[in-house]
Image (spheres, grey):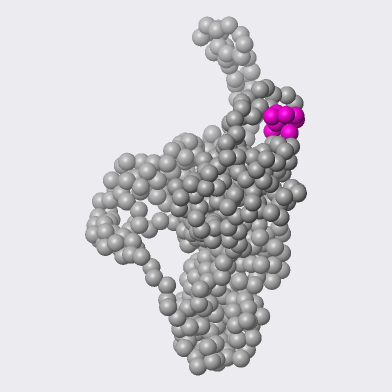
Amino acid sequence: MEGERRHKQAKQGETCKMTSAARCSRNSRLQRHRLQREKNLAESFAFDKASNKNKFMPWTGLAAKELPSALPRPRGQRLGEPEEPAASRRRVEHRGDPEALRRHREENEDRLRREAAAMREPAKQSGQARPLPFLNQEWQQFLSENRDAWQDLMRSAIADRRRLNEKQTPMSELPPAPRLQPVRTATPPFKWLKKLLASPDGFFALGGRVGAPASQRLVMFSCSLLKQCWALPLARLGPQRYVLYLKRVRSDFRPAQGALDSRPWANDADNVVVYELRLEFVGTDDRGPMFRAAQASEVPDAVLESKKCAEEGEEDGGDVAEASDSVLQSCQSSLEQEAEGAAEEADAEDGKGSDDDGEDGGRAAARTWTTESNGYFTFSDHPGWPDARARIAPRWRKPGEMGTKGAHKTATCHHYGEDKDSPRPITNLVLRAWTVWRIQQHGFHTKNPCRLRWIADQMAQLRRGVAALAHPSGRTGSPKADGLIQKWSGLFG
C-alpha cells in the first residue's frame, strides 16, 4: 500500500550506515563481517583465480592466446553425444599451423615477454594485501600485527558506549524546532465518535434518532488507527442486506467524521445513535462480499467509562503527532550516519584542484582539506585560500537530482569580518544556510521524507551556531552574513 511504502521510505536513509566500534557489540561486528564475506565470496574467488593465473603467465602462453588457430585441438566430448572413449576424445581433429606459431613467437618475443612480465607483477602484489582481512589466516595475521591498537580500542569501547547511551537534553535557550508535518487538529468531542473509539473494531450503524427508518442509517466497518476512528461504509441492497464494494475500498476508507457529511442528520451530531451490528456472511459476487444484519444493539454510554483514552478528544492529535515523530526519529538515526562512498568521491574531486598542494609541492591526498561531509554536501577549507567552500556530493550532482549548475558555493572570510587564520563561525554559518537553500531547488527535498529531516537538523545547527556567537543583536553581527542567512534559510524571519 502507498502508506506502507512511504513509511518504509521515511525510515530508510539515503546514506551508508556507519557504526563505530564503541556503538556495536562484538557479536554485531562478527555478523556484519560474515554477511559481507558471504556477499563477496564468489567475487573474491573469481578475483583470486584470475590473479593466480596471471602470476605464472608465460610469454609463450600469450603467443598462443593471440594466435589460437595455430594450436592443435583434440576432438573432445560434444554436447548431447553419448560418452566417447578416452582415445576418441584425444584424437586430434584440428592440426593447426605449428610453423605459423613459431614465426609469431620469433617476431614478437620481446613484446610478449614485456607483456607477460607486466601481467605477473600486479598479480603477485594483488594477493599480498587486501583492504579488509578475508580469510582466517589473514585475520590472524592482522590481529598479530595490530594487537596493541586492538586492545586499546577494546578497553575504551565500554566507556565510549556508556557515554553514547546518555540521554541528550536540549538547550534551554533555543526555540522549539518547527514541525515537519502539519499538526492534525483535535477530534471534536462528539459522543458517537467517542463510542466508536471505545468499542472494539467491527460493524456499526449510525442513525439520526431512535426509531428512525433503517434506510437512513449509515452501516459501516469501524476501526481505530493511531487513536483516530476510520470507517468503511457498506452499500444497502435491501432490507437488512448490505454489500462491501471492493473497488471502492481505497476511496471510501476515510475518517469516520467525514462519512456523515452526506447524511441529512449530519448537523445534529450530538444526537447520533450508535448501533453495534452482528452481520452474517451471505455470499459474494463481482461487487464484493454480501452480508445480512442478524442483530443490532445500541451502544450504551457506559462504554465510555471503560476506555479512558476516549474521554478526551484532544488527545488524538497528540498521539498521531507522536507516531509521526517516531517515524522521523528513526529517519534521523539513519541520516546521522555519514555516506562514506559519497564523501570519498567528493574528497577525491576536491583533491583535483590545482591549489590543493601539499607541503612538499605535490598534490595533497584526498580528504586533506575536508572539514565536514554529511552525505549531501562536502565542506572544504584550504589553508592557502582566502575562503571556504561547500560542494554538492557527486552522487547528487546530476540531472534529476540537484542538477549540475550551481554545484558549489564559495564564502570569503574577510567579507564577514573574520580572519582566515582564526576560527570562522560566521563563514561556516553562511555556507550551511546555502546548503539548506540549495537542497530545496528542483523539488529535491520533496522526493524523500528523510531530506526534510535533514533540513530540520541543519536549521537546528544554524540556531545553535547563532546562539553560540552571543551577539547583542541576536544575530551574527555581520550585516552581509545576516542578509544571506535570512535569504537562504529564513532563520531571522
User: Is any atom of residue 22 visible in this view?
Assistant: yes
Q: Which residues are magenta?
A: 236-246
Q: Quadrant of the C terminus?
A: bottom right
Residue 9 locus on image (x, y percent)? 58, 51
Which of the pair 389/472 is nearer the observer?
Answer: 472
Relative to residue 167, is residue 94 depicted above or below? Answer: above
Residue 115 locus on image (x, y percent)? 55, 45
389 drawn magenta: no
Residue 313 sits in quarter = bottom right
Relative to residue 477, is residue 112 depicted above or below? Answer: above
Q: Quadrant of the N terminus?
A: top right
Q: Would you say 227 lies left or right of 170 here?
A: right
Q: Would you say 120 lies left or right of 234 here?
A: left
Q: Residue at x 33, y 64 (%)?
A: 166
Q: Would you say 326 lies left or right of 143 here?
A: right
Q: Residue at x 46, y 76 (%)?
A: 360
Residue 64 locus on image (x, y percent)? 58, 32
Relative to residue 308, is residue 235 depicted above or below? Answer: above
Q: Residue at x 64, y 29 (%)?
A: 293
User: Is any atom of residue 198 visible in this view?
Assistant: no
Which of the pair 42/117 is nearer the observer?
Answer: 42
